[in-house]
Image (cartoon, rainbow, N blue to C red):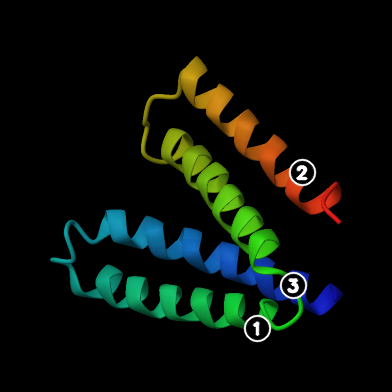
Amino acid sequence: MQLAYIFLFGAIVSEIAGTVALKLSHGMSRIVPSFFVVFSYSIAFWLAALSLKVLPLSIVAAIWEGFCIIGLSLIGVTVFGEKFGWVDLIGIALILSGTFFLTMLSS
């Protein structure tokens, strides 16, 4: 079970890296970031598939999507200078609480 969470963590990191590369590719017009997008997303889906062998789909989806949104929001603010307001903060809090309820309190 622990290995499945390690695979899921790897999927999250790979998807975040791929999405950052997607932004840097400028509409897939730059070859190196575009290659990295395809490579990172391939790794992300492969690792997610490995975690799905053990973990339920609802848990994998909630953790994967929730933490990707949070990670990308933080990168958007710190690296790309994107705006981050109260609505964004409330949305992330709701994502975290939903992830908590799905993973910790579901039977």
Quadrant position of the N terminus in the picture = bottom right
Question: Type of residue at label 3?
Answer: Leu
Question: Percent x, y for residue 74?
Answer: 52, 39
**Could you say where residue 13 lies in the image, as x and y percent from the top left?**
57, 63
Label 1 residue SS: helix
Residue drawn at 62 percent across, 31 percent down: 94
User: Going from the N terminus, do you reach mark 2 or mark 1 first?
Assistant: 1
Task: Estimate the x, y position of residue 82 in percent, counting from the top left.
Answer: 36, 31
User: From mark 3 to mark 2, how far is it between C-alphas?
Assistant: 15 Å
What distance separates the C-alpha of mark 3 from that of mark 1?
Answer: 9 Å
Residue at 23 percent across and 61 percent down: it is: 25
Residue 55: mark in rendering: 3
From the viewer's perspective, is 90 left or right of 30? right
**Residue 38: x percent and y percent?**
34, 77
Reading the chain from its start, which is encountered first: label 3 or label 2? 3
Numbered badge on residue 100 = 2
